[in-house]
Image: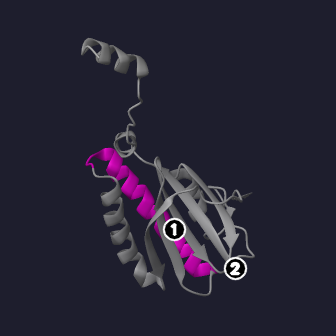
Amino acid sequence: MASLRFTPAPVAEAIRHWVVADYTHLGPLRASLCEAIDAQVPMAGPERDDLVERMTIVVTELATNALRHGRSTVPVQLSRSPVALVLDVADDAFAAAPQIHDAGSLEAGGRGLHITHELASDMGWYVEQDQKHVWVQFRLPRLVRRRQTPRIPVFDLKSFLRRVRRLGY
């Protein structure tokens, strides 16, 4: 068994928020998450499908853990950085550090964070305002990262002066 890394979530802009009150909200959460991913990854194909599948599995695992261990509703947030999507799931059981159980563990339960660790590109946890947050990061497909990063033209003084001289100024 290993502890999850204690570190704040990556800097990213919040896109969507959900509140999960009980297990019946997990299906609508997954459906809404798929819609949010579609808006952020406007492409079809196996890379997008893989991202959606991994993220819906992970959000289900994390929200289920939060419902099981916490005593109140579970806030879930989806954020985006230029290169990744970040899920942040919180509960009020802040005294207990999340533990990643070994894949071959014979204990009942406890494999959700191991599965999450395998499916995500990075993950960690932190405590804020009496809530424990577990965050998970998923790299965006390369094509989407390129499309979302604007190219900024750089002023080239030499080229500008050559053009001005050709025009006779």
Q: Residue furthest front?
A: 169
Q: Is residue 144 above or below residue 26?
A: above
The spot of residue 168 in percent (x, y) is 26, 13
What residue does disc 1 label?
61
What residue does disc 2 label?
130
SS for dot 2: loop
Disc 2 packing (10 Å; few <14; some 14–19; many ≥20)? few
The spot of residue 24 in percent (x, y) is 41, 83
The three-letter code of the residue at mark 1 reads Glu
Asked if labels 1 and 2 touch by Cβ distance under 8 angstroms, the answer is no
Residue 63 shows in the view: yes
Look at the image and give the residue range highlighted in magenta: 43-69
Q: Residue furthest right?
A: 95
The spot of residue 38 in percent (x, y) is 30, 58
Residue 22 colored in magenta in the image: no
Residue at (26% x, 12% y) in the render: 166
Residue at (51% x, 68% y) in the render: 61
Q: Which mark is residue 83?
A: none
Residue 52 colored in magenta in the image: yes
